[in-house]
Image (cartoon, rainbow, N blue to C red):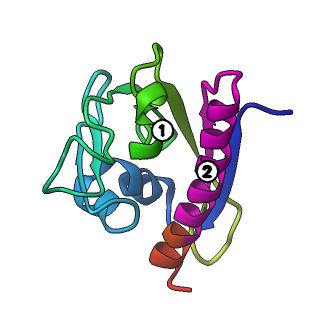
Amino acid sequence: MSKIIHHAVRLRCDTRRAFDMFTVSELLASWLARQAEVEPVRGGKYELFWDPLDRGRNSTLGCRVTTVDPGRFLAFEWKGPDQFQHFMNTARPLTQVEVFFVAGEQRLRPCTEVHLIHSGWRDSAEWEQARQWFDRVWGEAFAALGRHVNGD
């Protein structure tokens, strides 16, 4: 069984706009979390908050950008929500999310294929439960991103 999560979405925008959806805090908060604080430089913050009034819960507080190539590639650390925090958020290294932005072939309007790979899953029943949960949640998030950008 594969220990990675992979999701993709085709966005009707150029690669720079697609990249901004993951790196501009306000844009990221418009489709993925209630609040975001992103510094799109290596070592910069990649912190998302689903409950901004309690930033320590259900967040990626303390996560960092590990690689950035504007308009092409972004990688960052990732933490789990409350039900998985006791093992995911203390693991070293944390799980890793990599996002690739590939310009698509479209004549009248630019488009971008966005591919997300979430890796770093360990071998235990609780880790597998977390992986399956994130597989579902990333799928829902990418559907929301597609609706947000494409308007469908």
Q: Say whether residue 152 is visible.
A: yes
- Which mark is first along the chain, 1 or 2? 1
Work out whether 93 lies above or below 36: above
Query: Which residue appears at 32% of the width and 30% of the height?
Result: 63
Do the residues under discs 2 and 1 have CB atoms within 8 angstroms?
yes
How crowded pointer 1 is (Cα within 10 Å; few <14, some 14-19, many 20+) is rated as some
Residue beneath label 1, please? 84
- Kindly identify the amino acid type of the residue bearing the numbered disc 1: Phe
Left or right: residue 33 versus residue 8 is left
Name the disc covering residue 71, or none: none
Q: Is residue 87 left or right of residue 143?
A: left
Q: Position of residue 30 (x, y in %)?
A: 32, 68
Residue at (48, 26) in percent of width and height: 87
Task: Name the residue that disc number 2 marks.
Answer: 133
Q: Is residue 42 left or right of residue 128?
A: left
In front: mark 2 or mark 1?
1
Q: Residue 80: where, in percent of width, then height?
A: 44, 39
Q: Is residue 87 left or right of residue 65?
A: right
Q: Is residue 49 above or below residue 119?
A: below
Query: Where is residue 86 shown, x and y percent of the image?
Result: 42, 29
Residue, x 24% and y 57% (percent of image)? Answer: 51
